[in-house]
Image (spheres, rainbow, N blue to C red):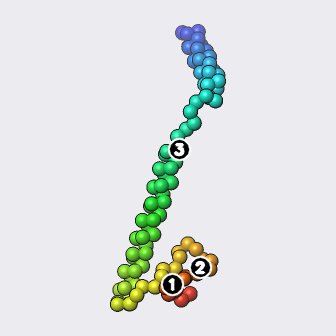
Amino acid sequence: MASYLWRKYADYVYTKWERTFLWDLIEPYRRPKSFTPLVTIYVAAFYTGVIGAAITEQLYKEKYWEDHPGQAVPLMKPIFYTGPWKVLKGDVLPPNQ
């Protein structure tokens, strides 16, 4: 029984090495992996961010309208950008808000 198990193990190790050797020879001639999953993830992440920004801005407008009914809503300050930013048209909130 022991010799049978050793023979099976030796066959497994040899065929494993043989498969690795053969695949290493063929590897340069294989097609490159597809970029479709990566592009799909990036597109989904982009549109998730766009939808999240739209929801955030809508909630900001609704809150402002509750506090100041009938007034025009000023531009929302950037949340994740703390540096200087220029507004060409529109009102900017004061620094303390």
Find out whether the residues at labels 3 and 1 contact each other: C-beta distance under 8 Å: no
Distance between mark 3 and mark 1 Cα atoms: 41 Å
Can residue 15 be spotted in the picture? yes
The amino acid pointed to by label 1 is Lys
Q: Using the image, determine if residue 33 lies above or below residue 59.
A: above
- Mark toward the start of the polypeptide (3 vs 2): 3
Q: Which mark is residue 39?
A: none
Closest to the camera, between mark 3 and mark 1, is: 1
Q: Using the image, determine if residue 33 lies above or below residue 6.
A: below
Q: Which residue is mark 2?
A: 85
Rate crowding at label 1 as few (under 14), some (14 to 19) or many (20 or more) other CA atoms within 10 Å.
few
Distance between mark 2 and mark 1 Cα atoms: 12 Å
- Closest to the observer, 53 or 29: 29
Q: Position of residue 10 (x, y in %)?
A: 61, 15
| Viewport quadrant of the N terminus | top right
Mark 1: which secondary structure? loop
Q: Which residue is mark 3?
A: 35
Q: Which residue is mark 1?
A: 89
Rate crowding at label 3 as few (under 14), some (14 to 19) or many (20 or more) other CA atoms within 10 Å.
few
User: Which residue shows up at 53% across the image and 89% down it?
Assistant: 94
User: Which residue shows up at 45% across the image and 69% down it?
Assistant: 53
Rate crowding at label 2 as few (under 14), some (14 to 19) or many (20 or more) other CA atoms within 10 Å.
few
The amino acid pointed to by label 2 is Trp
Can residue 9 be spotted in the picture? no
The amino acid pointed to by label 3 is Phe
Q: Position of residue 93 (x, y in %)?
A: 51, 87
**Relative to 40, is 27 on the left or the right?**
right
Find out whether the residues at labels 3 and 2 contact each other: C-beta distance under 8 Å: no
Q: Using the image, determine if residue 63 lies above or below residue 8.
A: below
Q: Using the image, determine if residue 35 lies above or below residue 80.
A: above
- Mark toward the start of the polypeptide (3 vs 1): 3
Q: Residue furthest front?
A: 88
